[in-house]
DNA sequence: GTGGTCTAGACCACT
DNA sequence: GTGGTCTAGACCACG
């Protein structure tokens, strides 16, 4: 299964589903046109409520990651053109600054941080190829 | 003032205070031994509830960023010893993977992402020097 | 073809068919007495389920836009007598109020809204002449 | 009360709440900074479930119509700058075309339609002054 | 007291 | 069978 959820995590379950699907798309596990499990199937599989899955799917549709076709199912969207690019870019930068500060408090060099990022990037790229 | 707070924001106010103090320390605005405003002073200054500031201070003490000395006040800790280094390192990596996924959904190249990170790192360093 | 349907769309497919036929009649593409494709033909052409087309035809008959003659086929009605004129008039007014509210939230002047309506009306009229 | 809801309507209750608040803002009944009833208060008043109100509030926040401040309440946003102006403009035009077609089927002249719109606009303007 | 999230179970419209 | 909506009731984090 390409999706896992931790009910005891601080981050909301529906958001974990959203991020999980986005990650699967980014990793190439899910490709444009692929059919997602139905709301109830996925809910069963993750042993969570179907409303929670539905909320996640609605959020994903709003983000243009998936497309919902009534009575047919939900599918990975063809071309996820990001609408509010500026907004998301700003958020991404803020997230980065937050972690630069955090790294500082972990006695971590900036050079080491950059190096770590390169490593993570490399690992991710490798993991992606092995799909 | 080295601290600002936005009551309209998805991130909790007390957490904004925590991050603000950590950022000030990382940027060198606050140095070991420096005295922080009292809970009530800071609450007044930021026009937020003093319970909120108290909660932030408790969190900061738990993180060994500050030290509370009864009857004397609260101070920036001498040596910010990172307690749960492994845990935080794991979180840092997860955050990085999230960036990669997010960048992917913004049609952003991995090389561009790395470049962005370098830029943000550079900007932060500059801001730090100008303090 | 005078009819197109978008399966990915918030508005139900059968309703898109209904509106499409009504639009064709209003634009003069379909005239009283014109024969419509059979349920199965149209379904084939639009690559949608024939139940969906059947539902649309039923709705159109209810609205006196078309007439279904057993064993002969379905035709554009001679005189589209508006049955529930009051009801539809009320809905029309409500829709207009919704436009005004929406325009207001888009920081749009009332004069600009009126101008926009005039433009849309003009464009539609032009499109109609070119059929 | 500036808000009413019809549970038997085809349009979802939560959306009726969304439109009701937007209308109240457009009419000037609710002004920037005004406090909205709490989720549970409004739910009680409209005799609907609090989750339904919560969903409406979340949608309104997404539209920048209101601002939610945790533990304090929800307020009308200061400056409702519309983000996806193009998208909404396109939708507005489509709605207009739909009703032009509809008016045609009601045997209504285009000139009469324009005149009706002017009237509705005038009525709305008057109703607004009487608040 | 505020909104946010989740579960459970139900009904509905659409295909 | 598909997703969308709603109710009922519960728990949690925040201020």
Image (tube, coloured by chain):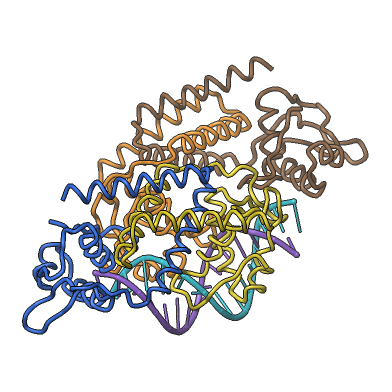
Chain colours: A orange, B brown, C blue, D yellow, E purple, F cyan
Position in image of residue A26 (x %, y %): 33, 44
Q: Looking at the figure, which quarter contains the N terminus of chain A?
A: bottom left
Q: As rendered, which of A49 and B36 lies closer to the eye?
A: A49
Left-right relation of D2 to B97: right
The residue lying at 31 percent from left, 66 percent from top is: D107
Outermost residue, top side: B130
Relative side of D79 to B31, left or right: left
Left of C23 or right of it: where is A102? right
Viewer-nearest residue: B76 or D108? D108
Residue D62 in the figure: left or right of residue D10: right
Q: Residue at x 16, y 73 (%)?
A: C50
Q: Give the vertical position of E7 relative to B77 (above or below).
A: below
The percent position of residue B30, horizontal first and vertical second, equals 74, 25
Quarter where residue D113 is shown = bottom left
Q: Is residue A1 visible?
A: no
Q: Is residue B67 in sight in this rendering?
A: yes
Question: Is C124 rendered above or below residue C40?
Answer: above
Residue D100 versus residue A96: which sits nearer the camera?
D100
- In-front residue for pair D95/A119: D95
Q: Which residue is located at x 48 percent, y 22 percent?
A: B119
Q: In the rendering, at what x and y percent does residue D21 appear?
A: 59, 59
Q: Position of residue A70 (x, y in %)?
A: 30, 66
Q: Residue farthest to the left?
A: C72
D73 vs B32: above or below: below
Count of residue discs: 0
The residue shown at (69%, 63%) is D37
């Amino acid at each position: 299964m390409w999706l896992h959820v931790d009910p005891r995590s601080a981050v909301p379950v529906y958001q974990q589903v959203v991020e999980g699907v986005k990650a699967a798309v980014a990793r190439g596990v899910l490709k444009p046109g692929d059919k997602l499990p139905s709301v109830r199937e996925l809910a069963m599989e993750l042993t969570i409520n179907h409303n929670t899955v539905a909320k996640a799917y609605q959020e994903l549709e709003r983000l243009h990651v998936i497309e919902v076709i009534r009575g047919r199912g939900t599918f990975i969207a063809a071309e996820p053109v990001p609408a509010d690019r500026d907004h998301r870019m700003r958020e991404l930068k803020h997230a980065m600054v937050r972690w630069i500060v955090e790294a500082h408090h972990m006695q971590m060099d900036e050079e080491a941080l950059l190096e770590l990022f390169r490593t993570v990037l490399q690992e991710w790229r490798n993991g992606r190829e092995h799909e």
